[in-house]
Amino acid sequence: MAHITLPDESLPGIVGLFNFRPETASSLRWLADTLLRGESPLTSGERELIAAYVSHLNDCTFCHMSHASAAMAHLSCDLEQIADIRNGFQEIPVTPKLRALHRIAAKVQKSGKEVSAEDVAAARAEGAIDREIHDTVLIAASFCMFNRYVDGLGTWAPQENEDYRAMGQRMAFQGYIHAVTQAAE
Amino acid sequence: MPHIPLPEHLPGITGLLEYNKETAAPIRELTQFLLRGESTLTPGERELIATIVSHNNACKFCTAAHTAAADLLIGNTETCEIMKQDIDAAPVSDKMKALLKIAKQVQVLGKAVTKEAIADAKSHGATDIEIHDTVLIAALFCLYNRYVDGMATVAPSNPEFYQGLGQRLVDNGYNRLANGYDHLKHQQQQQQQ
């Protein structure tokens, strides 16, 4: 059970919190939509992989599974491949540039100060441009917020890949502004 | 030097929020509501939450800026300084002490928040909304601190800069200034002359 009394305890993760506090939900949904589906040189699939990866590093099951499912939807991958995000991307096709950006994201997860000039130079050497470096850092930082919000209030999370299939597809193709509302139905 | 080119007259978070206004808009809206919107916690108390998290993330720019804002709103400089050393010794209410301890746990990780810390806050009268907002403010500053330091933005070393910024946060809050930030460029040029 969550640390605070939610109006509908059946709603998992951030969905239950959005329902509890609509005043902050609208900004958070707008932010997620802009970060993951707005204009960026990175594809939505690539950005969802960063979100899912950072959420895994923060040990946040709900965010990891839901964003992994959204990434699989964008990349037309099977849900079974979600485990590969936790296993260092051996199977999911990841460009050398995205791999370098993942290393920056993993540093951000620990602390902003961990990101070194060498990490950034390595991403640039693989073709990353300013905006891709910016978006990677901001997505990673944002999931350090979302993950703490979801787990810091003790929300619950479904455990199976299949539980996240429909949610991931809505997140990927309808977005965060409307899709999360529907997840509450 | 920042990892990407950013305007020199806008150090710290300010340059980043101008670099990409699309992502800045929801972040600004969320911050304005959480720190300045209607709440049973005062703006000064909410700035203390921002300060303790930024301090524990060792983010120089955010710590100095929110310390300056909290000092102005609370009316003294001791509260922040004592809080950073020892929450229990800070001249704040018992409820606020309990909420600051929750914020400190959130800084570590979401799962680091204990049932005991929540029960302690509730026993001192904290409402569910206050606990919710404390966790979300603390989480939001884990975003800001990583954004600011992860992009290696500049943190000015002169205390006057943060006095000015703290005053701006008290006077204008977190919304983007209607006329942007070009006036700061002129100020900087004048100072350099």
Image (tube, coloured by chain):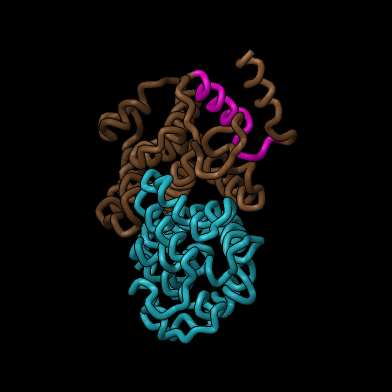
Chain colours: A cyan, B brown
Is residue A181 found inside the magenta-colored segment of the image? no
Q: Position of residue A93 (x, y in %)?
A: 47, 77
Residue at 71 percent of width and 35 percent of height: B180
> Could you say which is closer to the camera, residue A95 or residue A16?
A95
Is residue B163 found inside the magenta-colored segment of the image? yes
Residue at 44 percent of width and 29 percent of height: B64
Q: Residue furthest right?
A: B179
Q: Is residue A89 left or right of residue B4?
A: left
Q: Position of residue A162 (x, y in %)?
A: 44, 86
Q: Is residue B157 left or right of residue B167?
A: left
Q: Position of residue B82 (x, y in %)?
A: 30, 27
Residue B127 visible from this viewpoint: no
Residue at 74 percent of width and 33 percent of height: B179
Q: Report the magenta stretch's main SS.
A: helix
> Could you say which is closer to the camera, residue B17 or residue B110?
B17
Residue B62 visible from this viewpoint: yes
Q: Which residues are magenta?
A: B160-177
Quarter that holds the C terminus of chain B: top right
Can you say whether A11 is above or below A131 in the image? below
Number of numbered discs present?
0
Residue at 52 percent of width and 77 percent of height: A168
> Could you say which is closer to the camera, residue A145 or residue B46?
A145
Q: Quadrant of residue A55?
A: bottom left
Q: Residue furthest top?
A: B193
Can you say whether B138 is above or below B178 in the image? below
